[in-house]
Image (cartoon, rainbow, N blue to C red):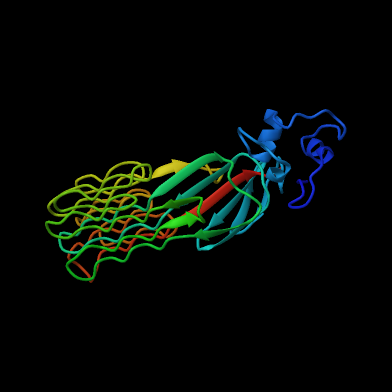
């Protein structure tokens, strides 16, 4: 059940949606009504309630359930269509990871990670979902490419991970910074961390920690899918035996798809290091 998406909304309908008698006395400034309409303070009008519901309904992505919650997971770009709005919407956005560098190859930085709980800004409309691809590994003596951004329309955007550096260079700036041979690859505040620095190949930054002198930074975990999932780890530097963070590649290894992991640095064997892993967008809300 939801309030009408257009036209006239009656007080009777508002009461019923709130679980009250249709003829009960109602205060439009009450916390119950403000929660339903998504207007925390200030002026409130009936049009603010278009499509409002204490339970949300939407389509798009791969849909699963966890108890009273529905989860929409986007592993590629698409559309999130809101049929009725409701409170308690959480979302996780992870951008594509950066590619590993070549020559003293440094690990790529993880894609930026944004996790928001209890968001109330969704309306009854279609939202374009963008899932960023991972950055390509360097094929010559240069930086890996940055990963691409992921977003929920104009709601929020996570920044692609920074590409890993090559000899005596700093990693690229990104959601998490690429690993550096000299200097620092900077991460984006609130989304990731700086890459590590080592002459022979620093690790890319991760959402959970900065890259170390060689290993990729740790990813960050959440339970938005109903189980603990850790994403957005940095790629490792060039030496064999090193490791990436969650989803991040080891030396010469690409980041895992749909984790935003950074690609591993080039070891000197083969043509390139690892490419970054693609991102993911996950939205969770109460549906029953």
**For this view, does 92 lie left or right of residue 83?**
left
Q: Nearer the viewer, residue 260 or 57?
A: 57
Instruction: State left or right for residue 265 relative to residue 275.
Output: left
Residue 33, above or below 95: above
Q: Residue at x 47, y 43 (%)?
A: 115
Please state the horizontal and vertical placement of residue 13, each as a whole percent of the image.
82, 41
Which of 79/134 is in front?
Answer: 79
Residue most toward the front? 43
Q: Which residue is drawn at 23% across and 52% down?
A: 179
Q: How many numbered discs, if any?
A: 0
Q: In this view, does 7 lie to the left or right of 221?
A: right
Percent across and percent down for residue 204 are 27, 51
Q: Can residue 231 be seen in this view?
A: no
Left or right placement of residue 52 versus residue 64 in this view: right
Q: In which quarter of the image is the C terminus?
A: top right
Picture coordinates of residue 22, whole percent (x, y): 86, 35
Kindly indicate the quadrant of the structure image that contains residue 11. Answer: top right
Which of 102/157 is in front? 157
Above or below: residue 268 compared with residue 198: below
- Give the residue drawn at x 19%, y 67%: 269
Specify whether residue 201 is in view: yes
């Amino acid at each position: 059940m939801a309030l009408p998406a257009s036209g006239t909304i009656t007080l009777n309908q508002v009461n019923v949606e709130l679980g009250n008698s249709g003829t009960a006395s109602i205060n439009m400034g009450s916390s119950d009504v403000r929660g339903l309409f998504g207007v925390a303070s200030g002026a409130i009008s009936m049009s603010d309630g278009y499509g409002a519901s204490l339970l949300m309904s939407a389509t798009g992505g791969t849909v699963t359930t966890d108890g009273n919650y529905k989860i929409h997971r986007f592993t590629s770009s698409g559309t999130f269509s809101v049929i009725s709005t409701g409170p308690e919407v959480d979302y996780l956005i992870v951008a594509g990871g950066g590619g590993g560098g070549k020559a003293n190859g440094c690990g790529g930085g993880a894609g930026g990670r944004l996790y928001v709980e209890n968001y109330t800004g969704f309306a009854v409309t279609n939202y374009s979902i963008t899932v960023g691809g991972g950055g390509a590994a360097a094929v010559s003596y240069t930086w890996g490419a940055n990963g691409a951004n992921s977003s929920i329309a104009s709601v929020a955007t996570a920044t692609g991970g920074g590409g890993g550096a090559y000899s005596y260079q700093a990693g690229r700036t990104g959601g998490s910074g690429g690993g550096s041979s000299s200097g620092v690859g900077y991460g984006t505040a609130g989304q990731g961390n700086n890459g590590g620095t080592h002459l022979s190949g620093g690790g890319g930054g991760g959402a959970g920690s900065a890259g170390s002198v060689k290993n990729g930074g740790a990813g960050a975990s959440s339970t938005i899918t109903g189980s603990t999932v850790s994403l957005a780890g940095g790629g490792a530097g060039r030496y064999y035996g090193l490791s990436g963070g969650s989803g991040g590649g080891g030396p010469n290894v690409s980041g895992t798809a749909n984790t935003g992991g950074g690609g591993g640095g080039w070891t000197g064997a083969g043509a390139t290091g690892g490419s970054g892993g693609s991102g993911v967008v996950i939205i969770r809300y109460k549906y029953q």
